[in-house]
């Protein structure tokens, strides 16, 4: 279920896109005007780099699911870990952590998994370990977002990977947000950790492919369920 409509680029990626596009255009113009032999192989090298950069920072429009009882995937990728644990820094509570690994071919814009109020955002510097390693959740650079919901507090970590240089957040604490709304971007990175109340019924398992704003990760329990 991959409902794209449009092909814009991610907010916060303009610097990268302008730099690579400018370098490619400058090289192309110089190669055309001067016919210098060294510029042709350079242009051949820069062309795939430019195309890969455009592809990496794509931000397709999506008709996200509209159901207050669903917890949506915060990003594209593969579920690599589902772990019950005590989260001792932000929530200070028992949780179940769902970890999603983003490959270089996935969309790297993140979306809010739930509707609610942002109570905390924190950027924490750290290492650049490979994002699929379990210890990356604790030691890598990350951006933490705590969301207050009627079902409890939810924590999302955007975790930088071995190639990632920066996590970008589009919002401020105190903002009311909707599930499926754009949250931010991990530049050239790499892992998302979602911490939910421990009794949340999950609808995914390890190995599942998920899409931000489209794939339900869980369904909240209600009085009528």
Image (tube, rainbow, N blue to C red):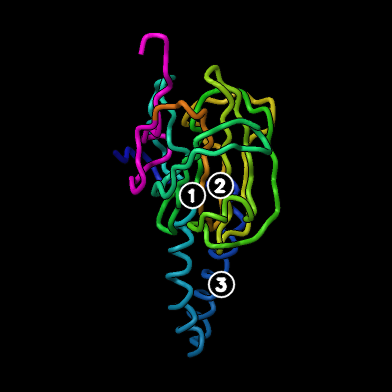
Q: Over which residues does the magenta segment extend?
A: 202-225
For this orientation, the residue located farthest to the top is: 224
Instruction: Look at 44% across and 63% down and name the residue there.
Output: 52
Quarter-wise, where is residue 71 in the image? top left
Is 32 on the left-hand or right-hand side of 128?
left
Residue 44: % across, % down = 43, 78
For this rendering, which residue is in front, 216 or 41?
216
First in sequence: mark 3 vs mark 1? 3
Residue 127: % across, % down = 65, 60
Secondary structure under the numbered disc 3 in the rendered image: helix
Quarter-wise, where is residue 63 in the image? top left
Q: Are marks 2 and 1 in contact (CB under 8 Å)?
A: yes
| Above/below status of 71 relative to 135 | above
First in sequence: mark 2 vs mark 3? 3
Mark 3 lies on residue: 26
Q: CA distance from mark 3 to mark 1?
A: 28 Å
Instruction: Look at 57% across and 46% down and name the residue there.
Output: 158
Q: Are marks 3 and 1 in contact (CB under 8 Å)?
A: no
First in sequence: mark 2 vs mark 1? 1
Mark 2 lies on residue: 185
Instruction: Look at 52% across and 28% down and name the residue there.
Output: 197
Disc 2 residue crowd, few under 14, some 14–19, many 20+, Cα 10 Å: many
Secondary structure under the numbered disc 2 in the rendered image: strand
């Amino acid at each position: 279920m991959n409902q794209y409509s449009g092909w814009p680029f991610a907010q916060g990626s303009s610097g990268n896109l302008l730099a690579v596009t400018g370098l490619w255009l400058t090289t192309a113009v110089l190669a055309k005007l001067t016919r210098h032999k060294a510029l042709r192989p350079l242009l051949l090298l820069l062309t795939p780099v430019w195309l890969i950069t455009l592809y990496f920072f794509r931000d397709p429009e999506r008709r996200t699911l509209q159901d207050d009882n669903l917890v949506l995937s915060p990003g594209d990728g593969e579920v690599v870990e589902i772990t019950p644990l005590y989260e001792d820094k932000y929530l200070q509570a028992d949780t179940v952590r769902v970890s999603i690994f983003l490959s270089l071919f996935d969309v790297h814009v993140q979306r809010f998994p739930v509707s609610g109020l942002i109570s905390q955002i924190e950027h924490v510097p750290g290492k650049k370990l490979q994002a699929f390693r379990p210890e990356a959740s604790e030691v890598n650079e990350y951006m933490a977002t705590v969301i207050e919901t009627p079902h409890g507090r939810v924590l999302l970590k955007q975790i930088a990977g071995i190639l990632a240089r920066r996590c970008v957040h589009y919002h401020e604490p105190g903002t009311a947000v909707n599930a499926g709304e754009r949250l931010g971007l991990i530049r050239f990175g790499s892992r998302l950790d979602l911490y939910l109340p421990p009794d949340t019924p999950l609808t995914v398992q390890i190995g599942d492919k998920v899409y931000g704003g489209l794939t339900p990760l869980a369904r909240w329990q209600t009085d009528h369920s």
